[in-house]
Amino acid sequence: MDEIDDTLIELLVENARMPVANLATKMNLARSTVQARLERLEQRGIITGYTVRLGDIMRSERLRATVLLQIDPMKLPAVLSKLKALPEVRAAHTASGRFDLIVTLSAQTTEVLDSALDAIGTVNGVRTSESLIHLTTRIDRRAF
């Protein structure tokens, strides 16, 4: 990766649907150069897909929460299996420190969110949990 790749990725983060010709113009490069770099970044697994980023209107219609979990030793695979079955679970990350797992939830209503939190709390292997409800998004750089 070099500065050109970094710039290309930054432009795609802003607008993943930007045509290659526009990317080339913004970067002052040949279209074929930009296309070749995109293909190389995809082949190396640096770019794994292009996606839709929801606007504030859509996100404001959903409740989001972060759940911090302490997991019994050797129970992580079983806990992850149960979490994958919950449609409200959007992401799960292992962590260092006091908690073993950081889980992101998204739900349409407080009742659905509450039910998902209850379900997580009953998973065999979850020792303790702490829930943080997201309020207002102040910074959003989810591509990184």
Image (tube, grey):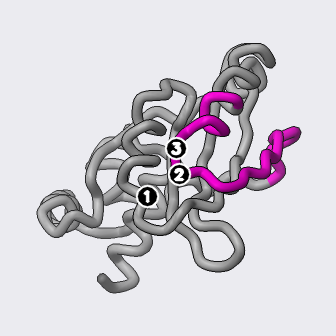
Q: Height in image: 130 above or below 53?
A: below
Residue at 39% across, 83% down: 3
Inspect the magenta stretch and tell me whether residue 99 lies in it. no
How far apart are the alpha carbons under marks 3 and 1? 10 Å
Q: Which residue is mark 2?
A: 125
Q: Which residue is mark 3?
A: 124
Q: Which residue is mark 1?
A: 76
Q: Which residues are magenta?
A: 118-138
How far apart are the alpha carbons under marks 3 and 2? 4 Å
Are the residues tagged 3 and 2 within 8 Å (C-beta)? Answer: yes
Q: Please name the amino acid that badge 2 sits on.
A: Gly
Q: Is residue 43 left or right of residue 125?
A: left
Residue at 33% across, 85% down: 2
Q: Please name the amino acid that badge 1 sits on.
A: Leu
Q: Please name the amino acid that badge 3 sits on.
A: Asn
User: In the rendered image, which quarter is residue 23 located in?
Assistant: bottom left
User: In this orientation, does residue 12 appear?
Assistant: yes
Measured as percent of width and height from the top left, residue 5 is found at: 33, 74
